[in-house]
Amino acid sequence: MNDFFAAYLFCWISACLVAVGIFVRRAGGLEITRRAYWRFLLRPWKLITFAIASLGLMGIAPYTGDMTWDAFDAAFMSALTFATAPWAVGVLYRTLRGQASLAAAYVAACAWMFSASWSYDLYLLLRDGAYPETWAANIGASSILYCAAGLLWNLEDREGWGVIFAFMAEPWPPDARADGFARVVWFALPFMLLAGIAILSFVW
């Protein structure tokens, strides 16, 4: 591994360790640690769309011609995205609005990068013994999917608001209840279409 990749690896591992330290110290103040977040995330329509997306990524991996993409990294990156993207996207938006702290935004940014990039890099480094040359291209491609997933799984039909991104209103995460997927689905389609196009582009 050359000096650049060694330095990059050191920097992002250090960034993740700092994020873990902040997470441990502020766990009670981070939405991702609350039951309300997981109740909000584990709604049937979100679990179904997650299953379809992750199985699709795992299923097409052998046909892409990309030796860095296999069923294993497709699976763990999908799981990390499902678990963290709705929270990370929401926190970063709310930080810009002055509704979340910079510390929370730092942890969210590291969760984004680890889920969309650094976990992929680490897996391939361990699998192949070399840092993947596709690391930079993967950041852009995977971040598009990560952001789209975070927006998709934040959609909510909220009384008095209509269909919105849940992080735009209080409380967030919202109280657990049915969210009228019959209305949400029309707003979800563009994000699912974007993800589908991005995934199929790898095949072509």
Image (cartoon, rainbow, N blue to C red):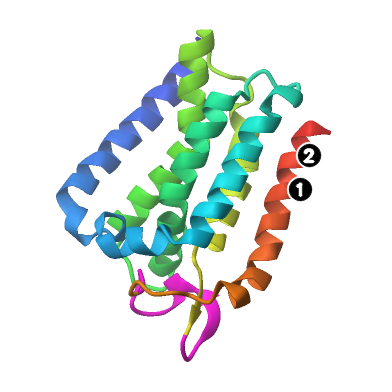
What is the span of residues highlighted in magenta in the rendered image?
159-174
Residue 71 versus residue 34 in the image, above or below: above
For the question of whether residue 179 can be seen, the reply is yes
Q: Which residue is mark 1?
A: 197
- Residue 171 shown left or right of residue 195 in the figure: left
Q: Which residue is mark 2?
A: 201
Q: Nearer the viewer, residue 12 or 63?
A: 63
Q: Position of residue 184 (x, y in %)?
A: 59, 73
Q: Nearer the viewer, residue 40 or 30?
A: 40
Q: Are marks 2 and 1 in contact (CB under 8 Å)?
A: yes
- Residue 73 shown left or right of residue 59 in the figure: left
The residue lying at 38 percent from left, 51 percent from top is 108
- Name the image quarter holding the C terminus: top right
Amino acid tagged 2: Ser
Q: Position of residue 101 (x, y in %)?
A: 29, 63
- Residue 31 shown left or right of residue 127 in the figure: left
Residue extending furthest right?
A: 204
169 inside magenta stretch: yes
Q: Position of residue 168 (x, y in %)?
A: 45, 76
Q: Residues within 10 Å of mark 1 (few under 14, many from 20)?
A: few
Amino acid tagged 1: Ile
157 inside magenta stretch: no
- Under circle 2, the secondary element is helix
